[in-house]
């Protein structure tokens, strides 16, 4: 008989105990994992909360991403949404569904990934609870909380005519990494592993979001620059004009890879998702916070334009990704 411990052989209580033991407490937690709900302190009576779900076969593939990768990405993608509101991440709740024959070491590595991402991206935050259940595939659902610390929340609807349009973080690198994985070119994947790592372990600019106190609007770029810029334009009732030349630097670092696998670096930068960078607007006389780069401006009208030409509202769509990217194969 095999001596390998699995979720099924250990049972829910012991599996959870072993997993939770990998996580460290944070200073905002009054009551952590173990009760019906966690209690999290804030500096005032307002906080932000966001939730996201990753499903095996649609949002990730087990043969591409390790348990550690998935834990990291689960934290990064959710605290990026919190930071996009101008809040400081304080606590997360993680629900995990796995097949019954999942080895306990997989869960422990998943927890290690969760904690590693917190240590790097939001060291004051904590996993304060969650749930573990069985399913035919891996499903990760995370709810993240953030403290506004007395600041006004940043929304998508505050952009004003005359504002500066700016980005903090990477553009196109996660899409490049995904294209490399799909290429199955092992040499290329190894040679350009930095971009693959951005896809599997995104590194959102958390500090830049918290510093963006003068931003009039802000959001996480999870579905691509074009699609998320359209969301700000629509919510704010304005037109966003993107300067093509301002994107040259983002494209330049990806040009070699694009040529090698026959794709367009500009398409990755404009339409590729999952970088989890920040897109924001600032008053024209504002000094951009460290990490932000101007890529355009806000004017009267509607829609998004690249060098004066309408930019299609295309990008990453997780609902249709399974069919488009053949993740079921």
Image (cartoon, grey):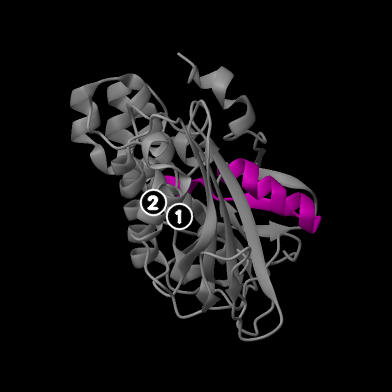
Q: In this view, does 82 lie to the left or right of 231?
A: left
Give 188 or 322, whichever is nearer the viewer: 322
**Front residue of this view, candidates 240 and 225:** 225
Q: Residue furthest front?
A: 1
> Where on the picture, by quarter, is residue 320?
top right
Q: Can residue 196 be seen in this view?
A: yes
Residue in the image at 41% along x and 73% along y? 25
Quarter of the image with the N terminus in it: top left
Q: Give the residue pinned by disc 2.
A: 72
Question: Percent position (x, y) of residue 270?
Answer: 52, 40
Circles 2 and 1, Cβ within 8 Å, touching? The answer is yes
**CA–CA distance in space, label 2 to label 1:** 6 Å
Q: Position of residue 89 (x, y in %)?
A: 52, 69
Check residue 76 in the rendering and tell me which mark sits there, or answer none: 1
Q: Quadrant of the C terminus?
A: top left
Q: Does the magenta stretch include residue 238?
A: yes
Other residues around mark 1 within 10 Å, as few (<14) / some (14–19) / many (≥20): many
- Name the residue: 74% across, 66% down: 158
Dot 2, crowdedness within 10 Å: few (<14), some or many (≥20)? many
Residue 196 magenta-highlighted: no
Q: Which residue is drawn at 67% across and 36% down?
A: 313
- 230 to 294, vertically: above or below: above
Residue 295 in view: no
Q: Nearer the viewer, residue 214 or 61?
A: 61
Q: Is 74 placed left or right of 151 in the picture?
A: left
Above-or-below relation of 187 to 173: above
Q: Residue 182: name its quadrant.
A: top left
Q: Give the overall secondary structure of the magenta segment.
A: helix
Q: Nearer the viewer, residue 263 or 22?
A: 22
In the rendered structure, the answer to whether residue 273 lies left or right of residue 282 reads left
Residues in magenta, as a range: 224-248
């Amino acid at each position: 008989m095999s001596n390998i411990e699995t979720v099924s052989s250990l049972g829910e209580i012991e599996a959870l105990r072993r997993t939770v033991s990998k996580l460290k407490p944070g200073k905002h937690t009054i009551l952590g994992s173990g009760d019906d709900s966690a209690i999290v302190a804030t500096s005032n009576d307002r906080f932000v909360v966001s939730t996201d779900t990753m499903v095996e076969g649609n949002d990730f593939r087990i043969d591409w991403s390790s348990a550690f990768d998935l834990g990291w990405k689960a934290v990064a993608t959710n605290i990026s949404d919190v930071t996009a509101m101008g809040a400081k991440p304080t606590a997360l709740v993680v629900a995990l569904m796995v097949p019954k024959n999942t080895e306990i070491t997989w869960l422990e590595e998943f927890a290690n990934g969760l904690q590693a991402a917190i240590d790097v991206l939001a060291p004051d935050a904590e996993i304060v609870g969650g749930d573990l259940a069985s399913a035919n595939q891996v499903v990760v659902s995370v709810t993240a909380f953030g403290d506004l610390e007395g600041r006004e929340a940043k929304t998508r609807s505050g952009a004003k005519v005359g504002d500066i349009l700016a980005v903090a973080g990477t553009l196109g690198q996660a899409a490049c990494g995904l294209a490399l994985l799909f290429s199955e070119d092992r040499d290329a994947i190894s040679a350009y592993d930095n971009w693959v790592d951005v896809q599997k372990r995104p590194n959102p600019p958390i500090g830049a979001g918290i510093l963006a106190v003068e931003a009039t609007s802000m959001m996480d770029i999870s579905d691509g620059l074009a699609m998320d810029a359209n969301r700000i334009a629509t919510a704010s009732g304005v037109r966003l004009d993107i300067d093509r030349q301002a994107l040259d630097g983002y494209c330049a670092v990806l040009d070699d890879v694009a040529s090698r696998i026959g794709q367009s670096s500009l398409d990755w930068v404009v339409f590729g998702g999952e970088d989890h960078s920040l897109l924001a607007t600032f008053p024209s006389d504002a000094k951009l916070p460290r990490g932000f780069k101007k890529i355009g401006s806000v004017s009267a009208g509607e829609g998004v334009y690249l060098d004066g030409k309408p930019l299609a509202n295309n990008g990453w769509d997780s609902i249709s990704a399974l069919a488009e990217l053949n993740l079921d194969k």
